Image (cartoon, rainbow, N blue to C red):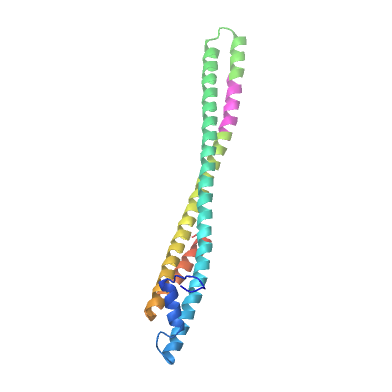
């Protein structure tokens, strides 16, 4: 061990060093290897950066989906409470109608009719609130579904970009040109899927 410390190199590091030294070849071969190494290194850096951004967006949309679903649940609970209140008013209205029909005096009938009218008015107001809350719950559900769809797109894009990076490492080690083309193809697909996510498609 030297005084400069102990270093462990992975296959990727060795491949880069080997390519930089020409891999034992000379002349034209060395130039081609160096060009390929530079292309793959640049591609990997760009795709890793784009993949990190897409991964962040995927996490953000997943968090939003959960938040929106929670908001929908809250609105549904509030709507349910309003419908229970509505049912309570309906029961009171039915009792008032029965009392009105059974009342022997006209004055009593008028008193109970006033209650019936009041309960009917209150029911309509409660129904309007309940309908509004249900509409809000449905809207939050739709927004949550849209965020989850977008999250899946970001996840698909990130996965394809990870495959592209893996192909880049293999291409660097094997010096196979077709793997380099596959790497570029996978990277392009990953970016395209990310564009679909950005456009909410």
Q: Is 74 in front, or is 22?
A: 22
| Residue that protrudes farthest toward the bottom in the picture | 27
Q: Is residue 194 left or right of residue 118?
A: left
- Residue located 41% across and 67% down the image: 163
**Foreground residue, 193 or 174?**
174
| Residue 42 position within the rendered picture, expressed as x and y whole percent measured from the top left | 51, 76
Q: Is residue 119 above or below residue 50?
A: above
Instruction: Tell me if residue 184 can be seen.
Output: no
- Stretch of the chain drawn in magenta: 116-128
Whether 69 is drawn above or below 118: the answer is below
Q: Position of residue 200 (x, y in %)?
A: 51, 59
- Which quarter of the figure has residue 187? bottom left
Residue 186: x percent and y percent?
A: 42, 71
Please count the marks in the image: 0
Q: Is residue 85 above or below residue 180?
A: above
- Location of residue 132 (image quadrant): top right
122 part of magenta stretch: yes
Asked if residue 113 lies in the magenta stretch, the reply is: no
The image shows residue 52 at horizontal and vertical percentages of: 52, 63
The residue located at (55%, 23%) in the rendering is: 89
Q: Is residue 69 visible?
A: yes
Magenta stretch prevailing secondary structure: helix
Q: Nearer the viewer, residue 129 or 18?
A: 18
Q: Residue at x 55, y 9 (%)?
A: 103
Quarter occupied by residue 29: bottom left
């Amino acid at each position: 061990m030297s005084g400069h410390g102990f270093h462990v190199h992975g296959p990727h590091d060795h491949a880069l060093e080997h390519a930089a030294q020409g891999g034992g070849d000379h002349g034209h071969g060395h130039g081609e290897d160096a060009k390929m190494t530079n292309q793959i290194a640049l591609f990997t850096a760009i795709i890793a950066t784009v993949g990190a951004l897409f991964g962040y967006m995927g996490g953000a949309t997943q968090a939003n989906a959960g938040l929106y679903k929670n908001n929908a649940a809250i609105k549904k609970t509030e709507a349910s409470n309003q419908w229970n209140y509505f049912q309570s008013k309906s029961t009171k209205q039915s009792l008032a109608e029965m009392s009105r029909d059974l009342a022997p005096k006209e004055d009593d009938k008028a008193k109970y009719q006033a209650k019936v009218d009041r309960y009917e008015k209150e029911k309509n107001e409660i129904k309007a609130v309940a309908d509004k809350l249900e509409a809000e719950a449905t809207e939050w559900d739709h927004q949550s579904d849209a965020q989850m769809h977008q999250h899946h797109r970001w996840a698909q894009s990130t996965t394809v970009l990870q495959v592209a990076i893996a192909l880049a490492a293999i291409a660097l080690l094997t010096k196979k040109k077709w793997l380099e083309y596959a790497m570029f193809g996978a990277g392009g697909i990953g970016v395209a899927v990310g564009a679909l996510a950005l456009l909410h498609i």
